[in-house]
Image (spheres, rainbow, N blue to C red):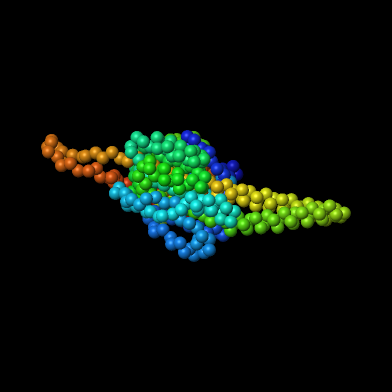
């Protein structure tokens, strides 16, 4: 009986937690936001993850194209071809890289998308281009660390 | 590092992330008029304009290139002087003929290396190079000949004040270190000795930190960073509209904006820099 209660409590706790998580790289801190998990550096590089339903049900190619078209429509300029990636937890996905000019500021914006039959895991990263490029290995590692929760 | 972010060639520089509040920053955008010579501070007044290109307006882009008659070479020389330390960062977006992206990237790297610079990062559609500040304008000009520039921005960050502050702090800390060492040599009390040891350790770490920052500033003043993003110019293809009947169609240019299916996926609208960084 006691075991059952403990198990139920554990399940409830897990269900209340974020559905996707990231590991914060050195020099980054977890910050609040409308994401499942978000980490940021003091200089304004932010990396965040969230899970959305795979609705309408579609595959990775479909969502890659949908994201790319929407971002281009918003003025994002791709500067690399979308690349296949694999998360640390083994999920296959695709990584899209853009430049976005916000007034005089040049931003980098990366979005990795992983599609399962029920859910889509999105991992976004953005920051001032110079700072972002200098921290690229850290950012890439943190993006790859994104994982689906229960 | 994820495969996505792994460039085929990478020589990453170490960059300190903290930008000191004392830094004065001057940014010249291609879409904004060049600042007048009378700056708001003594430092900006002394600063010559950063390098600029010949004016031309791209018919394929809303952005225009502006011209500014500047003397970047002289300025870059000034940047080397200990009294005048300027860090340059340049971003250039340019369009090249389809199929020439890779060869253009090679030429950009060649231009950097022939000026004594080196490759920073190479990507499929872009490259970041480091060039000696004295050759910044020359390299920028060479790159401009390789394609049509659609966007250009050059930032000159004055770090003289930060550098000189660091110099003064270093002198003071070294003097303090010397005094502590003298006290330690004379001290006979164990407690005093331990306290002095701790203090010496702390001050040594501070000295290392300040020296590191000064080295970083010197290196980044000597070498400017230039990021070039390339876009392949699409081949123009006539489209025959109103087919069906066969032949006799009207020839129309290809429209650049793709049709987008409306999906009931509100999250697509929430993608992007603004929400990620600001909310």
Is residue A113 in view from this perspective? no
Q: Position of residue A73 (x, y in %)?
A: 33, 48
Q: Position of residue B251 (x, y in %)?
A: 17, 41
Q: Position of residue A96 (x, y in %)?
A: 41, 41
Viewer-proximal residue among A34 and B167? B167
Q: How many marks?
A: 0
Q: Is residue A27 left or right of residue B173?
A: left
Return the residue found at the far right: B188
Viewer-proximal residue among B90 and B67? B67
Give me the residue at 56% from left, 51% from top: B80
Give me the residue at 78% from left, 55% from top: B180
Q: Is residue B136 left or right of residue B80?
A: left
Viewer-proximal residue among B76 and B92? B76
Q: Is residue B26 left or right of residue A62?
A: right
Determine which quarter of the picture holds residue B160. bottom right
Is residue A3 in view from this perspective? yes
Give me the residue at 38% from left, 37% from top: B101
Give me the residue at 36% from left, 42% from top: B147
Residue B46 drawn above or below residue A40: below
Q: Position of residue B76 (x, y in %)?
A: 51, 51
């Amino acid at each position: 009986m006691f075991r059952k209660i403990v198990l139920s409590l554990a399940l409830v706790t897990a269900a209340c937690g974020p559905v996707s998580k990231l590991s914060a790289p050195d020099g980054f801190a977890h910050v609040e936001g409308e994401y499942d998990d978000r980490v940021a550096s003091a200089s304004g590089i932010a990396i965040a993850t969230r899970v959305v339903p795979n609705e309408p049900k579609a595959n990775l190619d479909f969502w890659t194209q949908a994201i790319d078209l929407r971002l281009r429509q918003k003025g994002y300029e791709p500067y690399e071809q979308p690349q296949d990636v694999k998360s640390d937890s083994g999920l296959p996905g695709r990584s899209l890289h853009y430049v976005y000019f916000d007034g005089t500021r040049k931003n980098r914006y990366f979005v990795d998308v992983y599609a399962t039959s029920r859910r889509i895991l999105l991992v976004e990263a953005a920051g001032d281009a110079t700072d972002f490029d200098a921290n690229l290995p850290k950012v890439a590692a943190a993006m790859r660390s994104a994982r689906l929760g229960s | 590092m994820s495969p996505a972010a792994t460039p085929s060639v990478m020589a990453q520089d170490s960059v300190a992330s903290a930008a000191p509040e004392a830094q004065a920053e001057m940014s010249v955008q291609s879409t904004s008029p060049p600042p007048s010579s009378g700056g708001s501070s003594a430092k900006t007044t002394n600063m010559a304009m950063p390098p600029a290109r010949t004016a031309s307006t791209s018919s394929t882009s809303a952005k225009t290139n502006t011209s500014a008659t500047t003397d970047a070479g002289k300025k870059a020389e000034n940047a080397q002087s200990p009294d005048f330390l300027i860090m340059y960062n340049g971003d250039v977006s340019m369009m090249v003929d389809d199929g020439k992206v890779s060869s253009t990237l090679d030429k950009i790297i060649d231009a950097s290396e022939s000026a004594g610079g080196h490759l920073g990062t190479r990507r499929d559609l872009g490259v970041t190079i480091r060039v000696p500040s004295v050759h910044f304008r020359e390299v920028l000009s060479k790159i401009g000949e390789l394609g049509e520039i659609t966007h250009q921005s050059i930032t000159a960050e004055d770090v003289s004040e930060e550098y000189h502050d660091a110099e003064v702090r270093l002198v003071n800390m070294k003097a303090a270190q010397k005094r502590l060492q003298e006290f330690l040599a004379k001290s006979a009390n164990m407690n005093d000795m331990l306290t002095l040891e701790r203090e010496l350790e702390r001050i040594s770490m501070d000295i290392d930190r300040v020296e590191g920052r000064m080295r970083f500033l010197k290196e980044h003043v000597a070498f400017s960073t230039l990021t070039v993003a390339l876009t392949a110019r699409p081949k123009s293809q006539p489209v025959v509209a109103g087919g069906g009947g066969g032949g006799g169609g009207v020839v129309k240019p290809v429209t650049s904006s793709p049709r987008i299916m409306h999906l009931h996926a509100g999250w697509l609208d929430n993608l992007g820099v603004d929400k990620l960084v600001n909310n």
